[in-house]
Image (spheres, grey):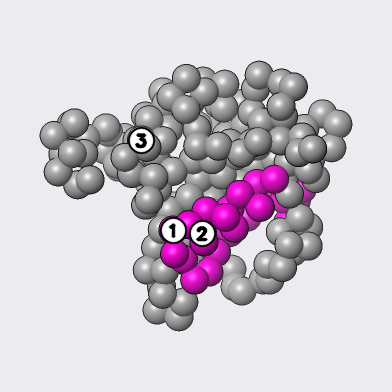
Amino acid sequence: MKTFTVQPLAQSQIHAAYPLIREAVPTLDLAAWSRFARLNADRRRAAHIGIMVAQRRSRPYPSGLFVYRKDADLQYGLVLTADHFVAIDIIDHRPVVSALTESLEALARRLACNAIRSIVRVGSTDVTPGLIGAGYRLEGAILCKQFDREAVSDARADFFRIPSEAKLAANA
């Protein structure tokens, strides 16, 4: 019997998942997370972007999550990119990582992706061994240069602004 279920983040789980995402992005405030989560957890866009959460069957709160997007890649064709991979459990985080990894692979197959790219952030040392154990390999490094904090904050606010229902329907 599986201990964890992995499903798309429901709108009703957005606040419950906030402590998890804070592990990946400690400076993220609740308002920014809520905007981001509403946009990315829109089931009409699930073939392109989404957030998956792992939950222990006997517990009401999520124990892990990842944010995904489907990208085009010159080397692999369609690639499923997983970011902000978080797995926390009071008893043992490894089953959470395993459940998320299995779900990620099933999602990539369902979306006809040829590869999965998982971005593991600095400080996510609990996640890396589980991904390597599942057959992932180090392919390179992601480097980031942050610009002026005010400009980044303004751009982030614009990026996460929820488009109107009409725009979402037109893009569906």
Let me know if residue 119 is in the magenta part.
Answer: yes
Secondary structure, mark 3, is loop
Secondary structure, mark 2, is helix
Residue at 52% across, 61% down: 109
Residue type, numbered disc 1: Leu
Classify mark 2: residues with Cα within 10 Å, few (<14), some (14-19) or many (20+): many
Q: Position of residue 11 (x, y in %)?
A: 43, 24
Residue type, numbered disc 3: Asp
Q: Name the residue under label 3.
A: 42
In the rendered image, the vertical position of residue 15 relative to residue 48, given as above or below:
above
Q: Position of residue 122 (x, y in %)?
A: 66, 52
Q: Distance between the residues labelled 1 and 2?
A: 5 Å
Q: Distance between the residues labelled 3 and 1?
A: 16 Å
The residue range painted magenta reads 99-128
Question: Viewed as shown, does residue 43 lie left or right of 54?
Answer: left
Does the residue at mark 1 contact the one at mark 2 (Cβ under 8 Å)? yes
Q: Mark 1 points at which residue?
A: 111
Q: In which quarter of the image is residue 4?
A: top right
Q: Mark 2 points at which residue?
A: 108
In the rendered image, the vertical position of residue 48 relative to residue 2, given as above or below:
below
